[in-house]
Image (cartoon, coloured by chain):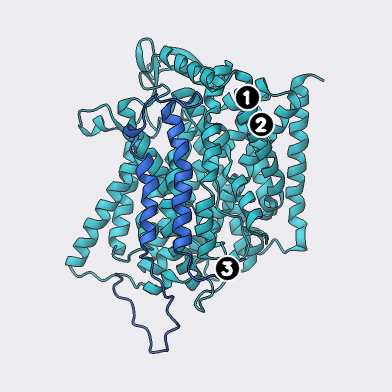
Chain colours: A cyan, B blue
Amino acid sequence: MSGRAIEITIFVVLFAVVTVLGFVAGRWRRANLDHLDEWGLGGRNFGAWVTWFLMGGDLYTAYTFVAVPALMFGAGAAGFFAVPYTIVVYPLVFLALIRLWSISHVHGYVTPADFVRGRSGSPAMALLVALTGIVATMPYIALQLVGIEAVLTTMGIKGHWPLIVAFAILAAYTYNSGLRAPALIAFVKDALIYVVILVAIFYIPAKLGGWNTIFSAAATKFDKTPNPADGILLPASGQLQYATLALGSALALFLYPHSVTGVLAARSRNTIKRNMAALPAYSLVLGLLALLGYMAIAAGTKPVVTGTMTSVTGTAIGPKTDGNTVVPLLFDQMFPSWFAGIAFAAIAIGALVPAAIMSIAAANLWTRNVYKEFLRRDATPAQEARSSKLASLVVKLGALVVILALDPQFSIDLQLIGGVIILQTLPAVALGVFSGWFHKGGLIAGWAAGMISGFWMLWNIPQLVFTADGPQVVREHFGGSAFKLSELGFNTQTSVYVGFIALLVNVVVAIAVTALLRATGVAYGPDTTQPDDYLVERGDPRVHDIPELTASEGAGGT
Amino acid sequence: MSQGAPSRPAVPEPPRPGRSDRSAWYWLLLIPLLTVLYPPLYNHQDPELFGFPFFYWYQLAMIPVSVVCTLVAYFGTRGPKQVDR
């Protein structure tokens, strides 16, 4: 059997095993999947170490294996922002998440929109938070699909088929079994991933001649490119961008519906605190996996060519390559075929599961905070479940549209653009757990200002390719997520993460409008929360289990 | 704080949590942010370690720092021992 054939066989076998398990999960415990609760949330009851193992496995997604290394391969040091991102995210959200847990367990909140309605007294703001959460999840799912697509492309499946196949598998998988599917195969997935990671970070550098060789090869490559901003160190003008990318991504992570659900499902505040402390250990592995991008450079990996790149004026620039194929190709080069097949399966399954979790969480958000709230107040459980199944499908279709319409140079931009959107819920959700000072009018105005400014900035970011003749514009709009401050009139080369600026605009407007509304005596919406509610721990009589969340997946991955 | 909230009816209050979220331990959580959110601090090549330029090994080294800070904050604010399985 040829190497390629072995690879494909092992990949298909592993994938089939996992997929079959996913469908069989639908029969597990003979639950009635026509109930939203059963479809929307799986069932699991494991101890602390097992949960840590499983949560850790969930963190390794297409972001880790495909997007970040691809950015390192193409742009250099800028891609390493994922490490400071994961360093700051846990201390940053520590206090906010335990308070969110408390308030949700007193009042029975299941989604961020539930909390916002209770705190701000504004159904309108809650609706905006729900819709934002649903839309922001789409680019994030898109990123996972792109990861699966990259693996299939590397294995030789040509044209548009990889994406279509990836989409079809994901859709079928979640439609049938709901969250029980990822819960059941978590062990298989995580074991595969850990094995691949361990081999990748020890075996490949050894085979390439050590870290010195790897960094030198990368430095040499970036010296040769016409782009002045790439390199194994950051250019001076890229430092602010780096810090705001890390901080912006960290602020955004736990605002996603799937992350909130994971947090609310924890047993207690202490469980959350403990996990926040233990999870950063994974950052170490993430950092080493990011360096797969440089290992690919040292190994001479050439990404798959998918067409020709032309500038907006029509001139051909060169071959269009799919940077996402860099890590699958590296594995293909460095591993024996049978192990490459395992590695491909690990990446694809590792992308499939978070995509499933994200689409289910977004679907639940739709059903609970939009469908049941505004469209059909007396929905039966069967109607709710059907609404969720359809919403899940729509969200995945949205992800597909995002991929086809945006087609960014770096797939990580998909997640960063999603971040621009979800960050606009920060004042209502994250600041709301600390203070009810923000007026509902201020929150809504801030949200609008943030969304409009965010989209304006994204619209004004072209995709540039650096050639010997200087930068050529390949796409005029939505070319990335780094906004040049010179567009605002500043005389500087520095750029900043769009999400960060949009958030600042949001907060400033929210403060200004709140101050105005207070001064003119406009009444606040009713705040049904009490200050002490934010402090309770399990054991307090006011805390009760939330039936819809009694057992669900842990916090979603990056 | 919140405005316009209806006042609670007069029922006996449940026992207070006995803790606020104002612990001094939480200041520790700022340290990880200070170590990595200022790139000029670490954006250079030397000194290298095991073939890694400073930019890379410094950030990786800050991970255990973050873990320690978060762990200490957890232990410091854990509250009375509970059956927490």
Where residue B22 sits in the image (x, y, percent)? Answer: 35, 65
Decide: marks 1, 3 in contact (CB < 8 A)?
no
Q: Earlier in the sequence, mark 1 or mark 3?
A: 1
The foreground one among A306 and A379 is A306
Q: Do discs 2 and 3 belong to a common subunit?
A: yes
Judged from the image, the secondary structure of the residue bearing numbered disc 1 is helix
Residue placed under numbered mark 2 in the picture: A199
Look at label 2 and name its amino acid.
Val
* Count of numbered tags: 3
Say the numbered circle drawn on residue A379: 3
| Residue sticking out furthest to the left | A519
> Looking at the image, is A442 positioned above or below residue A454?
below
Q: Chain of mark 3?
A: A
Q: Is residue A123 left or right of residue B3?
A: right
Res. A544 visible in picture: yes
How far apart are labels 2 and 3 at the CA level? 51 Å
Residue placed under numbered mark 1 in the picture: A204
Decide: marks 2, 1 in contact (CB < 8 A)?
yes
How far apart are labels 1 and 3 at the CA level? 55 Å
Where residue A61 sits in the image (x, y, percent)? Answer: 58, 40
Q: Do discs 2 and 1 belong to a common subunit?
A: yes
Q: Is residue A113 left or right of residue A380?
A: left
Look at label 1 and name its amino acid.
Ile
